[in-house]
Amino acid sequence: MTTPAVVDPPIGLETIEARAARRGLLLRLRAPRRLGVWSLQVVVARPRPGQSPLLLGELKGWAVPTATGLHLDTLRVWGETSYRVGPLIWAATFAWALETTPCRRARLLAIRDGPEQHRRLVRYFQRLGFWPQRELGAGPLDLGPRLLWGGSGLLMEGDCAGGLRRCQHLLGE
């Protein structure tokens, strides 16, 4: 008989913010709620004495109060990768969704800018635990989703708890 593997419980948003601070970073999450919809913005910046903080990464999205209601729209990471800005942003996003909303799955669009960029995006999102749902193309049924997402590409979905565990592993410590 084998014993089941021990899985660490997912970390919370407060712990993620503390990990960012130990790296000398500011992690801020804003999610005002209007008419039942959360507007989400997560930023990571490096403080600079006598200057405004240097923005290193940002994620924007929105959420509606359903299990599949987390929609992630824009992720940008600039400059220094040694801080692990991407995993900090993703971990904060997933932790916030699990702590604050009924959202348990997230959706995003791997935009189709060019073939190589698209392949890299899909691989990146798959490493975070997202899986393909369907292609958004030029068909008439795709018009609504394309307007919502702002383009064509591969619609993907991921589990927030699974994504948080993956990011927790990437952040280490």
Image (cartoon, rainbow, N blue to C red):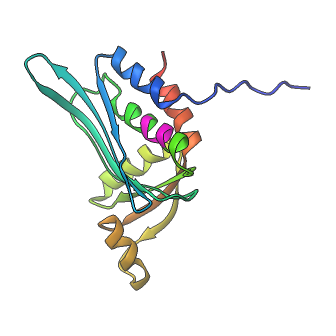
Quadrant in which the N terminus is drawn:
top right
Magenta stretch bounds: 92-96
In the displayed orientation, state which residue is furthest to the left: 50
Image-based side of 119 in relation to 5, left or right:
left
Residue shown at 32% from the left, 23% from the top: 83
Q: Nearer the viewer, residue 107 or 116?
A: 107
Residue 113 screen position, x and y as percent:
27, 60
Image-based side of 88 in relation to 45, left or right:
right
**Residue 131 to residue 26: above or below:** below
Image-based side of 107 in relation to 50, left or right:
right
On whether residue 145 falls in the magenta region, the answer is no
Q: How many marks?
A: 0
**Residue 126 to residue 92: above or below:** below
Residue 170 screen position, x and y as percent:
47, 27
Q: Determine which quarter of the picture holds residue 153.
A: bottom left
In the displayed orientation, state which residue is furthest to the right: 1
Residue 112 screen position, x and y as percent:
32, 61
**Residue 78 to residue 21: above or below:** below
Image-based side of 118 in relation to 11, left or right:
left
- Label the magenta part by its dominant secondary structure: helix
Residue 72 screen position, x and y as percent:
39, 53
In the displayed orientation, state which residue is furthest to the front: 35
Residue shown at 22% from the left, 24% from the top: 46
